[in-house]
Amino acid sequence: MKCTNCGSPIHEGDLFCGECGQKLQQGEFQSAEVVHDGPYPQQEQTAGPHFGTELMNMLKESFTAPGRRMDSRTLYSPGVAATLFASALVIQTLIMFLMLRNILGDFYIYTEIGFGAFFNIFFSTLLIHAIFFGILTLFNRVFLRTPRPFVKTFGDYISLSVILLALNTLAYLLIMIRLPEISLILLGISVSLFIVVPVYMYLKYMKDTASKLDSFYSVMIYFVLTGLVYYIIARIFANNLYQSITEVAPFYF
């Protein structure tokens, strides 16, 4: 199907054309798929009164059809995407914080897991997501001949990230009710998907536009960068953990 105004591909359920911003109404769809290799301008965003509706629509699409949401040219405002991500991140951080106080607090007799840990978890998770979104943005801008606009990549990344945050939240709840085996399985799935999400998005975008680099080498470069990022994160985490242990039990060192 294509837009009657500019001829760009559209999908059923789209409210606006992702190319020209034309508002779509019932009966404006025409059969015939068109591959558009030209520029991908940012669509106009909806006004304030529709914020709540947009937020709920994005949440629903993120869980019911994340792949089709990526294929769609419907663009959600960055404010809606950021609000959805921040809400999911706050919920995950709160559950993880309560889990740490509930489980680890039993072992740290001489200290207490303070509320500062909440902000450490929140900003650490936010930083990791920002790094991987930065890698995706780099690939989008450098390797795709027709890069997707920031609004599109940001919205798609948030949609998939919300699913991962929900998996993490469920895993932490299972730990709190003493079901660590199932929790570890969910966390393993979440970590694996978190690594795969940016390259999955990049390969999805390659379906509509040519890449400047062979897809195999694109994936290889991505995993090299991912390995480097995880190495740095692991070193920082190990150093912080060592410092925390020496502060709690200095007589062992």
Image (spheres, rainbow, N blue to C red):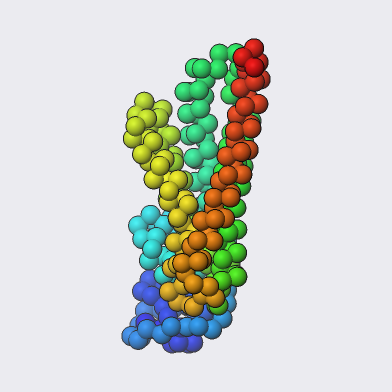
Give the residue displayed 60% in from the left and 64% down from the top: 138
Give the residue displayed 40% in from the left and 30% down from the top: 175
Give the residue displayed 40% in from the left and 42% down from the top: 188
Picture coordinates of residue 234, whole percent (x, y): 57, 39
Height in image: 244 above or below 189? above
Height in image: 24 above or below 169? below
- Report the side of 14 relative to 112 (left or right): left
Quarter-wise, where is residue 183 in the image? top left
Quarter-wise, where is residue 109 in the image? top right
Residue 21 in sight here: no
Picture coordinates of residue 75, whole percent (x, y): 50, 68
Q: Nearer the viewer, residue 37 or 196?
A: 196
Residue 161 in sight here: yes
Looking at the figure, which quarter contains the C terminus? top right
Q: Which of 78 and 125 is in front in this view?
A: 125
Picture coordinates of residue 217, whole percent (x, y): 50, 66
- Report the side of 69 relative to 106 (left or right): left
Height in image: 64 above or below 175? below
Quarter-wise, where is residue 172 in the image? top left
